[in-house]
């Protein structure tokens, strides 16, 4: 499961619940051995408290790193409530961190199909994060069709637009191979 909640929906009433959040690092600050991450998705931002035991496994977390956090929602003390965020009354105490950067960087991709081709696993992650099954995804710069393949693999409909006839033909061939399997 990629997530149980979005980064914008947790409130004080959720304190004590175990959750899974996925999103991008907005900021990462270290205070001694304790770390705090502001994790965001399209719905909002949640502060993540990173246990000192997990800090050694963080490595170099940069802005825009894609993380999945498993942890427990905790109510923040009154004097630490952040009124800038809808989730400012809580933070999530991380129990486990998964970083998607390494997974996506190590993927083997088909070389030479398109100069800006993305790994299909990355596109699948984004599609699962921001859409539901049977919804339609629009890729108006389809290139070699990787987004359409990710749609097929995640039970989404896809509409692809590509002006370059050569890349359109490459995408069409790749998509047909998947559909005809």
Image (cartoon, rainbow, N blue to C red):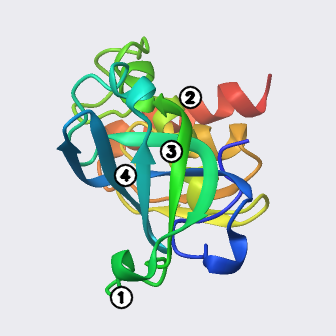
Task: Identify the mark nearer the N-term, 1 or 4.
Answer: 4
Q: Secondary structure at mark 3?
A: helix
Quadrant showing the N terminus: top right
Q: Nearer the viewer, residue 158 or 120?
A: 120
- Residue 83, labelled with which disc? 1
How far across and down, in percent of the image, does residue 76 sit?
48, 70
How far across and down, in percent of the image, does residue 155 sit?
77, 48
Residue sitting at the far bottom: 83
Task: Identify the mark nearer the N-term, 1 or 3.
Answer: 1
Residue marked by disc 3: 147
Residue marked by disc 4: 24
Residue marked by disc 2: 174
At x 38%, y 31%, the residue is: 52
Task: Kindly report the distance in space between the C-alpha atoms of the residues bearing marks 1 and 4.
Answer: 21 Å
At x 29%, y 31%, the residue is: 114
Q: Secondary structure at mark 1?
A: loop
How far across and down, in percent of the image, does residue 170 sit?
44, 31
Picture quadrant where residue 109 is located: top left
Task: Kindly report the distance in space between the C-alpha atoms of the residues bearing marks 2 and 3.
Answer: 11 Å
Task: Kindly report the distance in space between the C-alpha atoms of the residues bearing marks 2 and 4.
Answer: 30 Å
């Amino acid at each position: 499961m990629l997530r149980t909640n979005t980064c914008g929906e947790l409130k004080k009433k959720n304190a004590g619940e175990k959750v899974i959040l996925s999103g991008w690092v907005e900021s990462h600050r270290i205070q001694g051995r304790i770390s705090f991450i502001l994790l965001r998705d399209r719905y909002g931002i949640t502060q993540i408290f990173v246990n000192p035991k997990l800090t050694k496994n963080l490595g170099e977390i940069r802005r825009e790193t894609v993380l999945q956090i498993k942890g427990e929602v905790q109510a923040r003390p009154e004097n630490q409530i952040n009124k800038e965020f809808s989730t400012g009354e809580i933070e999530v105490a991380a129990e486990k961190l998964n970083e998607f950067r390494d997974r996506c960087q190590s993927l083997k991709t088909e070389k030479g199909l398109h100069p800006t081709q993305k790994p299909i696993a990355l596109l699948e992650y984004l599609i699962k994060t921001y859409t539901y099954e049977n919804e339609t995804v629009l890729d108006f710069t389809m290139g070699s069709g990787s987004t359409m393949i990710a749609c097929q693999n995640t039970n989404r409909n896809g509409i692809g637009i590509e002006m370059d006839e050569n890349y359109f033909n490459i995408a069409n061939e790749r998509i047909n191979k998947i559909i005809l399997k």
